[in-house]
Image (tube, rainbow, N blue to C red):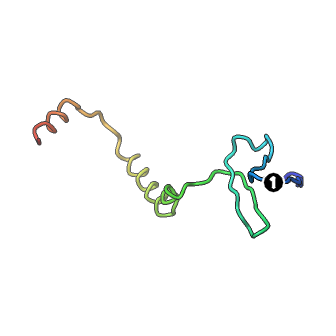
Amino acid sequence: MGAKRAKLLTVPANGQISIGKSWAGKQIRVEEIGKDEIRISSGTFVPDSQAVFYTKEAQETLREFNAWESKKPSKATNTKALFASLRKKK
């Protein structure tokens, strides 16, 4: 871990601050720790809508699928026959 640096900023009336170009393009999380403290962290964050894919259950299901897929080699699909069968079902 690098040396810690403190930076004193004054927040203007619009509430926006600049934290420097070294943070440009990075995804950050701003946590409000208390009434008078915030923490800024960089990293990769998972949106709530995708969090279900990062659970232990989802990871295990993916491992099981990958094991199944490695034992079942893919084969070419006869698309003409497939589309013909779909037309017949209508």
The image shows residue 66 at horizontal and vertical percentages of 43, 50
Give amino acid for label 1: Val
Q: Check the image and report above or below for 73 versus 12.
A: above
The image shows residue 89 at horizontal and vertical percentages of 11, 42
Residue sitting at 70 percent across and 57 percent down? 30
Front-lying residue, 71 or 31: 31
Quadrant where the N terminus is found in the figure: bottom right
Front-lying residue, 43 or 75: 43
Q: Check the image and report above or below for 6 versus 34.
A: above
Q: Check the image and report above or below for 54 versus 26.
A: below
The residue at which mark 1 appears reads as 11
Quadrant where the C terminus is found in the figure: top left
Count every numbered label the image shows and give the total: 1
Q: Residues within 10 Å of mark 1 (few under 14, many from 20)?
A: few
The image shows residue 71 at horizontal and vertical percentages of 37, 47
Q: Judge from the rendering whether residue 47 lies leftward or rightward of residue 58; answer left or right.
A: right
Residue sitting at 75 percent across and 44 percent down? 23
The image shows residue 24 at horizontal and vertical percentages of 73, 41
Q: Judge from the rendering whether residue 11 lies leftward or rightward of residue 55; answer left or right.
A: right
Q: Check the image and report above or below for 67 versus 77.
A: below
Front-lying residue, 83 or 69: 83
Residue sitting at 76 percent across and 69 percent down? 35
**Which residue reaches farthest top?**
80
Q: Judge from the rendering whether residue 10 lies leftward or rightward of residue 29; answer left or right.
A: right
**Which residue reaches farthest bottom?**
34
- The residue tagged with tag 1: helix, strand or loop? loop
Q: Quadrant of residue 47?
A: bottom right
Q: Quadrant of residue 72?
A: top left
